[in-house]
Image (tube, helix red, strand yellow):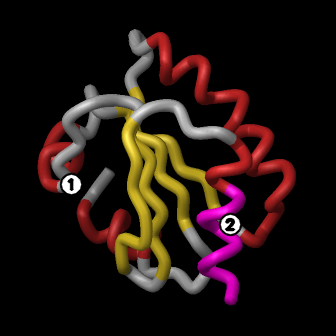
Amino acid sequence: MSKSSFKDIINSQTPVIIDFYADWCGPCKAFAPILSQLKKEMGDKARVLKIDVDKNQVLAQKLQVQSIPTVMIFQNGELKWRAMGVQTLHTLKQQLAQLQN
């Protein structure tokens, strides 16, 4: 993923949830269905993006991703929230709801 496209993606009024993951990561696999459910429930109110840290090492380093999964929510180019580890659907929806006010 190029830097310009990443900037274009996060520079959106629509919140962008980014999941930094790796194919070999067990917790990442456990988190995938939660993200799928979130995407289904939120529809076009939020965008879900998965970024493989092994294929995007420069970006992961730039954003200081030190453990996976790491989830970040960006809106209008700003990091609004970040957390490490598997997050619940409730937590993610709560964070998104705060951005829609």
- The residue segment tinted magenta is 93-101
Apparent side of residue 53 relative to residue 64 in the rendered image (left or right): right
Q: Give me the residue at 60% from left, 19% from top.
A: 30
**Residue 53, image x and y in percent?**
29, 33
Chain-order first, disc 1 or disc 2: 2
Asked whether 9 or 91 is in front, the reply is 91
Asked if the magenta segment contains residue 13, the reply would be no
Q: Give me the residue at 79% from left, 40% from top.
A: 37
Q: Give me the residue at 27% from left, 30% from top.
A: 67
Q: Are discs 1 and 2 less than 8 Å apart at CB?
A: no
**Residue 74, image x and y in percent?**
45, 70
Q: Please name the predominant secondary structure of the magenta segment in the image.
A: helix
Q: Which circle marks residue 46 in the picture?
A: 2
Which of the 4 image quarters holds residue 11? bottom left
- Estimate how packed mark 1 is, as few (under 14), some (14 to 19) or many (20 or more) residues with alpha carbons within 10 Å: few
**Residue 70, image x and y in percent?**
38, 40
Residue at image mark 1: 63
